[in-house]
Amino acid sequence: MKGQLSRLAARIRDEVSALERVSQRVTEGWRRTLTSGDDYYLDGVALNLHGYYSGLERIFGLIAAIVDQTKPSGANWHQALLAQMTKEVPDVRPAVISHATFERLNEYRGFRHVVRNIYTYNFELAKIKALVINLPATHERVTVELLAFADFLEHRSREGEG
């Protein structure tokens, strides 16, 4: 288990780096959308917002499977997984994300669902704009919390080593 925790910590750090690149793509795509008026850039922004949350969900799924040893299922598993990350598991782990971060990420989770279920020409510009504007602060907050959790995993993986 200790090796798994160390590998998970490394994976979280790798994913956080990838999320930074995705966040930058969102920002640049939005800039191009505004300067060109080209809806195809907006499609790219939406896809990257989808990818951003999907990357987080990948991390949360690994934490649920490896650390918690339980992943939600059913129709609302995406929402349940995000909520699971706000809960401390006594004698196992602290909360992965704060409730404030949950509130922010829940907006991206909901948008991920929209991207998967409507045609791109039906996107609401105002909704995408709000997500883009909030992404830098959201990303900063989630990065701090995920890296702190990765540190926790590293510490836990070294416990008992002499």
Image (cartoon, grey):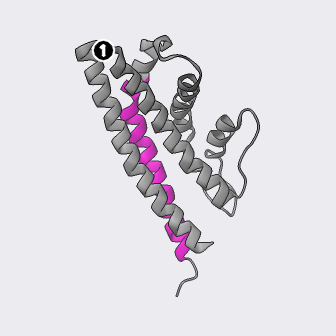
Residue 91 falls in image quadrant: bottom right
Residue 73 falls in image quadrant: top right
- Return the residue nearer the eye: 84 or 98: 84
Label 1 crowd bin: few (<14), some (14–19), many (20+), radius 10 Å: few
In the visual, does 4 lie left or right of 139?
Answer: right
Instruction: Identify whether 30 is placed above or below 125.
Output: below
6 part of magenta stretch: no
Instruction: List the single residue furthest toward the right.
Output: 74
In the visual, does 122 lie left or right of 45?
Answer: right
The residue under the point 40% across, 44% down is: 19
Instruction: Identify whether 120 is placed above or below 144.
Output: above
Considering the whole magenta stretch, tell me its main secondary structure. Answer: helix
Residue that mark 1 sits on: 38
Q: Quadrant of the N terminus?
A: bottom right
Q: Position of residue 119 (x, y in %)?
A: 52, 16
Where are the magenta residues, as a range? 131-158
